[in-house]
Image: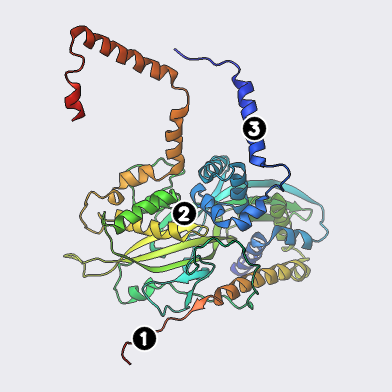
Amino acid sequence: MYVAVKGGERAIDAAHDWLARERRGAPELAEIGNDQIAGQLKLATDRVMAEGSLYDRDLAALAIRQARGDLIEAIFLIRAYRTTLPRFGHSVPVETAAMACIRRISATFKDAPGGQILGPTFDYTHRLIDFALLAEGAVPPPRDPETMPHVTGFLGRDGLIEAADPDDTEPGDLTRTPLSLPADRALRLQALARADEGFILSLAYSTQRGYGRTHAFVGELRIGLVTVEMEIPELGLSIALGEVELTECETVNQFLGSKTEPAQFTRGYGLVLGQSERKAIAMSLVDRALRWKELGEDFTGAPAQDEEFVLSHCDNIQATGFLEHIKLPHYVDFQSELELIRRIRAEALKQGTADTTEPEDRA
Amino acid sequence: MTDEQKAERAAWMGLLARSQPSELARLMPALPPHDTIRAPEIGTTMIRGRAGATGAAFNLGEMTVTRCAVRLASGVEGHGYVQGRDKDHARNAALIDALMQGPEAVALRAAVLAPLQASATARARARAGEAAATKVEFFTMVRGE
């Protein structure tokens, strides 16, 4: 059985026309440009890049405009577009130690070599609506970029933190192979990097409140540009073909040691496309919570420790697709349920036992 | 090609890739006749990171890349791989790559590569200056002294 529809095409066309007019807003006002969105709503643009899992600021801005500011809809547009593109290759792992930082802070070392750079942060602002956004201030004199070594490196020299030795095993790729569990850390990090910021934030917060506590310090948080280098096999060359802005968070976590390992700190790691320190910090907390098995910790049943729960529910495009599909016609499904419940009720009424079990079920 | 020549070519290809498309377009010389081997094509590169910055590699997310290949009448091939979706940018990068392998290299280095390098350095220094202006120092204060 199926349900046909009449006049659907005309109705859909009319809906799309109306949508276009709504998107444009009042015609007497100037239309917003992609460059204005990318430049003045940069953090919204960066979120769409991060969760759309595609670094292209102009495209993210266009998606936000098309989606009328609905960021999840914009992320959907980016993900859909990405699937139409060929993949030319993959980069050499980015060198975040060589990042040209615009922000770099440590909550564990006040004297981190290279210094602490506040950058364009909301921290220390009063968080009051500013009804008269001031004109830009004077531009400071240019100077040469400084290199800033990772602060976890200092702990590493003394063996106070677990090693993170280079490993060039080909990492799994969620965009090529559907997620299978158990996932390794590489796959988890990919999933978390493109996961919904709100979901990851809440999970990270839950670990701080005791659901899978990991005692995290922000060893270092940095935002800046890194060079993206890719091997071009047909030329036998490796080219630094782009620069991307990334946010990186390294947490330093408590660890008591085991029979085979002396006590040392452990690591949580967050790396996100664009500027989003909330997401990067949250990602590093969730990454650390998910590492309980390899670090020999107990599974306390906390949601943030549950790999299947986290990885299966962190993607807002999957989530929104399944959630919103229930608004689509389910006439046939519902018709069968309706017939079933009518039949059950009719049989029960016939036997005169209609309500005898109901109160117990409620209790 | 020697390793040194390869490194030199990789350096100019990278500089062309990371340049502002409009700036490169402005600096382009008069073009000799050429064939297109591969028309500009938009695709992606998967950006990789490392767990804990130094550990196992993982896939972070993709970036858009446009590539193009051209051949000059002399038979020299030029390749452009540039960030973003600007097809003219990829073609211009491929053309300069081809010309840089010929007798025009010295002139092009001064007329195209040097200004692009200067702009890139200026952008990096401007950002570093902004960052340095927000640097803070922490002092440990001991109570009762």
Vertical placement of residue A319 versus A233, above or below = above
Residue A137: x, y in percent?
Answer: 64, 72
Local crowd size for mark 1, using a 10 Å CA cut-off: few (<14), some (14–19), many (≥20): few
Residue, x 18% and y 8% (percent of image)?
A351
**Amino acid on which the number 3 mark rests in the picture:** Trp
Q: Which mark is residue B60?
A: 2
Instruction: Tell me the distance, in whole angstroms, between the alpha carbons under discs 1 and 3.
Output: 64 Å
Instruction: Tell me the distance, in whole angstroms, between the alpha carbons under discs 3 and 2.
Output: 38 Å
Vertical placement of residue B116 versus B63, above or below = below
Residue, x 32% and y 44% (percent of image)?
A309
User: Toward the viewer: A21 or A41?
Assistant: A21
Q: Is residue A13 left or right of residue A122?
A: right
Q: Is residue A47 left or right of residue B7?
A: left
Q: Which mark is residue B141?
A: 1
Vertical placement of residue A224 versus A11, above or below = below
Disc 3 sits on a residue from what chain?
Answer: A
Residue A306: x, y in percent?
Answer: 28, 48
Q: Where's the N terminus of chain B, which quadrant?
A: bottom right
